[in-house]
């Protein structure tokens, strides 16, 4: 579940499992809020729309807010400290570091029951590291490589 009944209806039940889902939109439209919410709802029981798993949050823009995640957990009647403990967090500093963190996330997921990987934002560091028309082709190639991992 996304935690929002109407959004779940639009998505025919929530976020699809086993796939890449992209949330995009203007600044301050709730994309990071949705990411925080999914980190909580993925921990819920399957019967409640969750996946009974932990989450990994790769932050590229410094937008992760532990306190906000705990507030969301309280909204869903969950222990806020336990909900936060079930989210593995890492801050990526450049696109190469982001690629390495994704590889590390794959290794972590093999050790425990993880239900969700969030990359907020998947494209931001690639836009920064590969700027201008001259680097557009290389940026797209590297971003494609990241998405295929």
Image (spheres, rainbow, N blue to C red):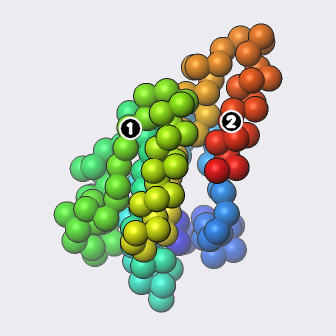
Give how far apart the Cα atoms at labels 1 and 2 are: 18 Å
* Relative height, residue 63 to residue 78 (above, below): above
Residue 98, horizontal then vertical, whole percent: 51, 37
* Relative height, residue 108 to residue 139 (above, below): below
Residue 136, horizontal then vertical, whole percent: 76, 20
| Residue at point 39%, 72% (across, down) | 112
- Name the residue furthest bottom: 47
| Residue at point 48%, 85% (across, down) | 46
> Residue 3: in sight, yes or no?
no
Quarter of the image holding residue 96? top right
Q: Which mark is on residue 91? A: 1
Labelled pair 1, 2 in contact (Cβ < 8 Å): no
Task: Name the element at disc 2.
Answer: helix
Residue 141, horizontal then vertical, whole percent: 75, 32
| Residue at point 77%, 12% (across, down) | 133
Task: Name the element at disc 1.
Answer: strand
| Residue located beneath label 2 in the image | 143
């Amino acid at each position: 579940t996304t935690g929002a009944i109407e959004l779940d209806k639009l998505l025919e039940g929530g976020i699809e499992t086993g796939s890449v889902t992209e949330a995009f939109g203007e600044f301050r439209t709730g994309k990071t809020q949705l990411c925080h919410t999914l980190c909580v709802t993925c921990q819920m029981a399957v019967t409640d729309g969750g996946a009974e798993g932990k989450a990994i949050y790769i932050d590229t823009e410094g937008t992760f807010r532990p306190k906000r995640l705990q507030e969301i957990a309280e909204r869903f009647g969950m222990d806020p400290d336990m909900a936060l403990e079930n989210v593995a967090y890492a801050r990526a500093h450049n696109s190469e570091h982001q690629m390495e963190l994704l590889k590390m996330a794959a290794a972590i997921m093999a050790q425990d029951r993880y239900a969700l990987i969030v990359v907020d934002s998947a494209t931001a560091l690639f836009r920064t590291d590969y700027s201008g028309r001259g680097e557009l082709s290389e940026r797209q190639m590297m971003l494609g490589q990241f998405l295929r991992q």
